Image: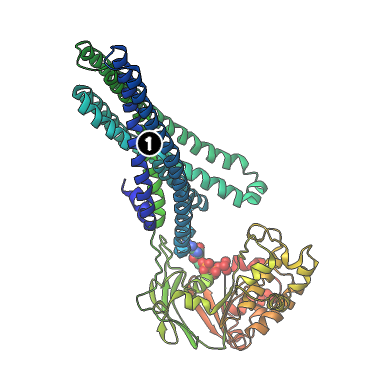
Amino acid sequence: MKNLWRCIQFIPEYRGKLLGVIAVGTVLGVIGTATPYLYKAIVDVVARLLSSSISRDEATNSVLIILAVFLLLRVGVVVFGAIQNRQADDLWLDTVSTFRQRVFDNMTQKSIDYFEKTRVGEIMDRFGNITTITMWLSSLTDGVLASFFQMILIVGVLLWKAPVVGVIMAAVLVLNLWISYRTVGWTKPYRRGWQALAGRMTGLLAEMIGNIATVRSFGGEPAVKQRYDNTQEEWKVTRGKLHVTEWRSEQALNFINTFGVFTAVVYTTWIALQGALSAGDILLILTLSQMLITTVGPIARQINQAGEIESTAERLVELLDVESDIQDRPNARQLVQIDTIEFDQVSFWYPGKDSPALNKISFHLQAGQTAALVGLSGSGKTTIVKLLMRFYDPTQGRILINGIDLRDYQQRSVRALMGVVLQDVALFNDSIGENIAFARPGAQIADVRKAAKAAHAEDFINKLDHQYDTVVGERGIKLSGGEKQRVAIARAILKDPQLIILDEATSALDSESEELVQQGLDQLRTGRTSVVIAHRLSTVMNADQILVMQNGLIVEKGVHEDLLKEPAGLYARLFSLQTQGRHLSLARQA
Ligand SMILES: Nc1ncnc2c1ncn2[C@@H]1O[C@H](COP(=O)(O)OP(=O)(O)OP(=O)(O)O)[C@@H](O)[C@H]1O
C-alpha cells in the first residue's frame, strides 16, 4: 500500500477531515451494534411476560423505554449518516481537486525530454487515475470504515456473550481479511499488466487522433487498428486471468462464511437447548453473527479493490516521480538583462543517441546583434535553440549569458526575456485574442491588436466571423499554417522580449506574406538580440553573423558578403542553389 500512502501524503491537509469522518464512522458502528441489543431486550421482556415473571404493565413500560431508545438510535443513524455522506462528498471534492492541481503543476515542471519520449495518451490515462483513487478513498470513508468498526464491536460482543461463537466469527473475520489481502498479492501482476495495457490503448488512440490526416492519407487505418486490437487482446487475456483469481477467492470466502454462520447457529441452538441462553440472547447472537457475515463481504471487496487502487496509485506515483533533468540550482540567480550570449565548446547528445547533435559549438553574440543559423536539415540548428532556452543542458561545454553559466540562472527568469516563434507553431484551443495575450497575461486588447498588426495578422483576423474572439481549434487546426505563424509572431511581439528566437518563423508563408511579416519581424528585431534559423537565406542576409551548420558542427562563420567569397563553401553553394531556385538538388548534394 506504499503507493496509495504516497498519494495520500500528496494531500496532507485533508488528514484532519479524514479523522472527522472516522469519528462519525465509529459512532455509526456503535449504533449499528447496539440495535440488535434492543431486539434482544424486547424479546426478553416478552418472554418474561409470557412466563408470567412480570405484569403486562411492567412489560409495557419496559418496552416503551426500549422503543424510545430504539427511535433515538434510528434518528442517530439518519443524522450521523447524513453528516458522514456530506463529509465524504466534501472530502472527495477537496482531495480530487487539490490532487489534480498538484499533479498538473508537477507536469508543468517536467523536462521537455520526458514529453518527447512519452505518449500523451499514457500521461492522460495516468492523470485520469486521480479520480479512481480519490473515489476509492471516498467510498472508504463513506460507510466502509463504519462497517469495519461495527465488525470489531460485533466480534467483541459475541466473545463476551457466547465466547465459542465469538471465536468462530473472529476466525471467519480474520480468514476473510487474510484471503482478501492475499488475493491482492496474487492478482498484483495481472492488475499492473492490464492497467499498463489500458494506458497503452489510450496512448494509441490519442496518437491515432493526433495523426489522423497521415493515417487517412496513407490508408493506414487497418495498420493502426491492428496495433490497437493486438493490445486489446492482450488486455483481455490479462483481465481474464485477474477475474479467475478473484473468482476463486470469492468462492472460498463464500464457503467459509456459510460454514462459519452455520456452525454458529448450530452451537447457539445447542447451548440454548441446554437452557444456557435466554430467548433474547439467542436472537442477539444469531443477529450479530448474520450481521457480521453481511458486513464482511463489502469489506473484503474493498480490500480487493485496494489492490487495484494500489496499482493505479503506483502508475500515478511513477508519473509524479519522474524528476525533471532541468532543475534550478540552489541560489540560482535572476536574469534581468541579456548583454552577451556565448556558446563555449558546447556538445550535446540526445538521450539514447550514439552521435552528438552538436559537436563543440562556439560562438559569441553581443546584445542587439542577430545570429543566423543556417545549414542542411538535421544539422543541429533547432538543438542550439533548445539549449539556449534550457530545454536541455549541454552534455559538454557551457552556455554563458553575461559571462555566467546559463545553469546558474533561474530558468523562468531566462525564458521570461525570450520571445520565441518555433517551426511547429502550437496554439491553444482558445480565441485568437487569448492566444496572442498568452505572452502577456492581462494585456489590453489594444496591445493585442497592435501586436497582430505588426505581425501582419490583422487583415486575416478581421475577416474571421468573430475576429479576435474566433476560437482556433485544437493546436490551431482551424487556421492555415501561415495564419498560425502570424499569430505566433504577434504573440512574440506582444511579449516585447530582449532576445528573439525565430525558428523558421516564416516558413509557412507565401512570398508576399513573408515579405510583409518579414518587415514586422525586422522591426521587432531592431535593437534586440536575435537568433534566427532560416532555410531561405535571403531572409538572413543582413545578420551580424551567419553560422553555417553541418552534422552538428559550425563549418563556416561570418557575414553574408564574406561567406560568399568562398565559392566552394557550403553557404555559397546553398545561396547559389536558392537563387537559382534549384531546391531539389540540395538534398542530393548533401
Ligand atoms: N528529441 C530528439 N531526440 C533525439 N534526437 C533528436 C531529437 N531532436 C532532434 N534530434 C536529432 O538531432 C539532430 C539535429 O536535429 P535539429 O532538429 O537540431 O536539426 P535542424 O538543423 O534544426 O533540422 P531542421 O532544419 O530540419 O529543423 C538530428 O539528427 C535529429 O534527428
Image location (x, y in percent) of residue 63: 36, 24
The one of 63 and 322 positioned closer to us in this rendering: 63
Q: Quadrant of the C terminus?
A: bottom right
Q: Name the residue under label 1.
A: 302
**Residue 287: x and y, percent?**
33, 23
Q: Residue 176: give x, y in percent of width and height.
A: 29, 29
Left/right of residue 573 with respect to residue 8 in the rendered view: right
Scheme of image coloration = rainbow
Query: Quarter of the image containing the N terminus?
Result: top left
State the residue at coordinates (52%, 48%): 203
Q: Does the residue labelled 1 lie within 8 Å of ligand 1?
A: no
Residue drawn 27% across and 34% down?
152
Q: In this view of the protein, which residue sits in the foreground, 63 or 172?
A: 63
Q: Is residue 371 left or right of residue 23?
A: right
Q: Is residue 214 visible?
A: yes
Q: Is residue 350 above or below residue 444?
A: above
Q: What residue type is labelled 1?
A: Gln
Residue 126 visible within the image = no
Element type at marker 1? Answer: helix
Q: Is residue 527 left or right of residue 519?
A: left
Residue 408 image-quadrant placement: bottom left
Q: Residue at x 43, y 64 (%)?
A: 350
- Give whichever of 103, 137 is nearer the camera: 137
On the image, which quarter does residue 528 sit in?
bottom right
User: Picture coordinates of residue 471 (x, y %)?
Assistant: 70, 61
Q: Quadrant of residue 561?
A: bottom right
Q: In this view, does 290 lie above or below 347?
A: above
Packing grade of label 1 (10 A; few <14, some 14-19, many >=20) is: some
What number of labels is visible?
1
Q: Nearer the viewer, residue 453 or 43?
A: 43
